[in-house]
Amino acid sequence: MGGFPLLIRAHRGLRITEEQRLRFVELYMAAADRAGLPDDEPFRAALRSHVEFGTEVAKQNSHAETDDQLHPLREVPLWDWE
């Protein structure tokens, strides 16, 4: 089993803090710079939005003690930019 169920399982029990979530976003964006990804504003805004959203989902799932406490999302949404 892979995909989203594996992603949910990987985060459960980690109890991600807001500080850790923000640090992950910071490091992800720095890695995008280092990898030479486009630096135009629409692309970067979409990338940041994607990472911010994903880390919020991961943080919620990392604190879930029951399946009912998991974020309802079960597949990764698509982001676009002009």
Image: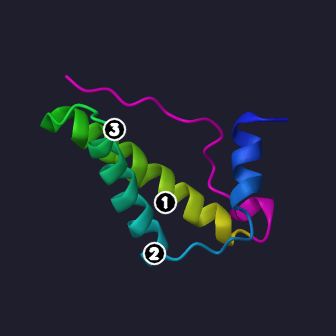
Region of the chain picked out in magenta, as a range: 65-82
Q: Residue at x 34, y 38 (%)?
A: 35
Q: Residue at x 67, y 72 (%)?
A: 63
Whether residue 70 appears in magenta in the rendering, the answer is yes
Q: Quarter of the image containing the C terminus?
A: top left
Instruction: Residue lying at the far left in this picture: please name it.
Output: 41
Label 2, residues with CA under 10 Å away: few <14, some 14-19, many ≥20 = few
Task: Give the mark nearest the N terminus, 3 or 1.
Answer: 3
At label 3, which amino acid type do we have?
Answer: Ala
Q: Residue at x 77, y 54 (%)?
A: 9
Q: From this view, report whether residue 23 is shown above or below residue 82.
A: below
Secondary structure under tag 3 reads loop
Label 1, residues with CA under 10 Å away: few <14, some 14-19, many ≥20 = some
Q: From this view, report whether residue 2 is shown above or below residue 12.
A: above
Measuring from the top left, give residue 31's x and y in whole percent.
36, 48
What is the quadrant of residue 22 in the picture? bottom left
Task: Give the mark nearest the N terminus, 2 or 3.
Answer: 2
Measuring from the top left, give residue 19's x and y in whole percent.
43, 77
Can you tell which mark lies on residue 35?
A: 3
Can you tell which mark lies on residue 18?
A: 2
- Give the labeled residue for mark 1: 56
Real-space Cα separation, disc 2 to disc 3, in angstroms: 26 Å
Answer left or right for 36 relative to 57: left
